[in-house]
Image (cartoon, grey):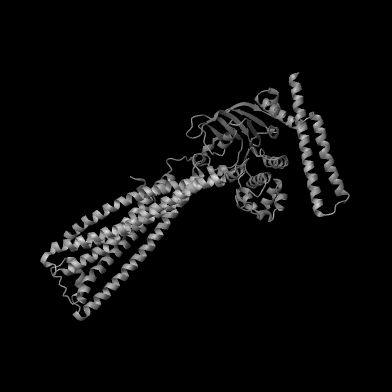
Amino acid sequence: MSYSKLLFEAFIRRYPVWILITIILGFSGGLFNGVSTALIAPIILNFLGQNVNLKDGPPLLRAIMAPFDNIPENARLLVMAGAIIGIIILKNLMGYTASLVSSSLTRRLTTDLREAGLRMLLEVDLGYYSQTKVGDLINRLGGELGRASNAMGTAIRLVITAITVLVFVGLLLAISWQLTIASTALLGLVALVNQYWVTRSKEFGRQLSELSRAYSIGILETLSGIRLVKATGNEGREYQRLQKLIRDREQADFQSQANSGAIGPVSEVTGIAGLMGIVFLGRTFFGNELEALSTVLLTYLLLLFRLLPFVYQLNGARSSLANTDGSLEIIYDFLRRDNKPFMSRGYLPYKRLAEGIHFDRISFAYPNRQELILKEINLYLPRGTTLALVGGSGAGKSTLADLLPRFYDTTSGCITLDGIDLRQFDLRTLRKSMGIVSQDTFLFNNTVRNNIAYGKPEATDEEVIEATKRANAYDFIMGLPKGFETLIGDRGVLLSGGQRQRLAIARALVQDPDILILDEATSALDTVSERLVQQALEELSRDRTTLVIAHRLSTVQKAHQIAVLDKGNVVEVGTHSELLRKGGYYARLYSMQFSDDRQNANGNGTFKTRFSYEFRSRLNTMIGSLRLLADDMIDTPEEQTELLELSYSSAIALLNTLELFEDTRKATEQTKVKSN
């Protein structure tokens, strides 16, 4: 069975009542249309003064004319005209109702398609997004899905038209089966001619889908990387690339429209030629009886002539369906679930951690890849403690953290919470209990408040304000134009990196997670922002079970455990002091960072001289600013604000200098102990 049939069955079969109503209305409209057309010939002949004798005519025409036999001759013509008008009114009423029903059914099917697409995108695993371009997804959910929806609407209209055609064919067979066979043969030739255009329409539709996909991907990638485009001066090259895609797409669209537009004229010309041939055949069939049976032949020709537009509509609908064939194939593949990764949802509601988290000999490889990223990891994180993951790039730290909220499932081994396999817990309640703060913080183009309360929409204003204070974010939020109601732009572009991080921490505090995952949350920040964010992270981590991924080892020295990863293996586990005493991989990492920090601090002089200079400079600046403020030697409020900001930044820099000196002193002492 083709993908189009599967797609239609998957959605249209949900509405059997609507389908039945559509069929009944289509049949009724076709019947009223045929009967009204069959009455026109006798009225015309009566009006022209010709005697209408159907005693030897087809039973169908005799049955249609029977109700008028007992009407007086002088009133018969008027009654028949009134009957035609009444039947035409009924026909149009049926057609109007059928149009409303089919439109409603089309809208329902379109809604079902869009909802199915959205549901699939929200439920599919993250691995699907790593293998699919976002621009492709947007094109499928937008343009291609719209074209597929139009195809379903076209299919419904095709059904109604086909029913009307069948009704007319039945009437024609009842009048003259010989002429109907001949008509079918001639109209078959018309359909054969049209098949060429239908095939071309299908090919043009596929080209249009491919070009639309390429354009959507290209425009999204260009806009996403607009800073790089401008920084490298490639605006012209990107414009030419996208311009070519636009013109190719418009050319394909023109060819498709030109092909579809040709079907009507071709059908009309061949149809009229076929009609003239049928007139000739009618004279051949009836011979000398033609004058006596002029009513029959005229009625037949009127029905046939009325049938031709519906045949043209059928050909147009076939062409339209063929044109959207590529979109139907794309949407069918898009909505399929058997070729996409979906993890089990679990059934146990997660409450709170009582004992701890055990990474029980877990190994992991990304989908469709053979290479193991993690190999036999065995770690235990007791409740209320902090486990830090450190190591070089590509060691597997972030991958291990992604397994905890089940962004991926382990290849072998398992993660247990209080001895229960992670996969048994209900996925929604499990993730609701976890707070994740990463280096790449995502914020919606919404207000500050709505971003903070995203994990807990029912949070009160008091909860939001308290969370921002604990996250060191309240002061800068109140300095924004509209405070908590300030719109922060796409991905929080109107905020600094440190401000975005503190909003993410406030969001986690509002959510009140039982388990916390911190993925290099301070690695991309400047010194001042890092200090503020680190303080907020310490507040967030208090009394929580925390998994930390760190690049700067100075940020994880207070962790209860530090696990050192290298090429997917855990090579060392212990506290900061224990790992330094071992003199292994962690000690080498720390020594390298310590050397870099010391080199950065030394400059052209010794470390102590540099420290003394930095310390005195920062201290003098801070004292001088505070003295001016204390002696009230300022002229304007702006100058007062400037001095306060200068004092604050000097104090932060002073604290950083002291921290660097303390780290250096400890490392030096440990080096001396090892050498002794």
Whether residue 29 is situated above or below residue 591 in the rendered picture: below
Residue 176: percent from left, percent from top: 17, 62
Residue located 16% across and 59% down the image: 178
Front position in the image: 427 or 301: 301
Front position in the image: 35 or 489: 489
Left or right of 114, for residue 624: right
Question: The N terminus appears in which quarter of the rendering?
Answer: top left
Left or right of 593, for residue 632: right
Question: The C terminus appears in which quarter of the rendering?
Answer: top right
Q: Quadrant of residue 168?
A: bottom left
Residue located 81% across and 54% down the image: 637
Residue located 68% across and 53% down the image: 462
Residue 249: percent from left, percent from top: 44, 49
What residue occupies the far top of the structure in this picture?
Answer: 676
Whether residue 635 is situated above or below residue 48 in the rendered picture: above
What residue occupies the far bottom of the structure in this picture?
Answer: 74
Q: Is residue 72 visible?
A: no
Whether residue 43 is situated above or below residue 395 in the rendered picture: below
What residue occupies the far right of the structure in this picture?
Answer: 631
Whether residue 164 is situated above or below residue 569 in the rendered picture: below
Residue located 29% across and 53% down the image: 194
Residue 102: percent from left, percent from top: 38, 60
How many numbered circles does the render carry? 0
Residue 306: percent from left, percent from top: 27, 64
Q: Is residue 523 visible?
A: yes
Q: Quadrant of residue 504?
A: top right
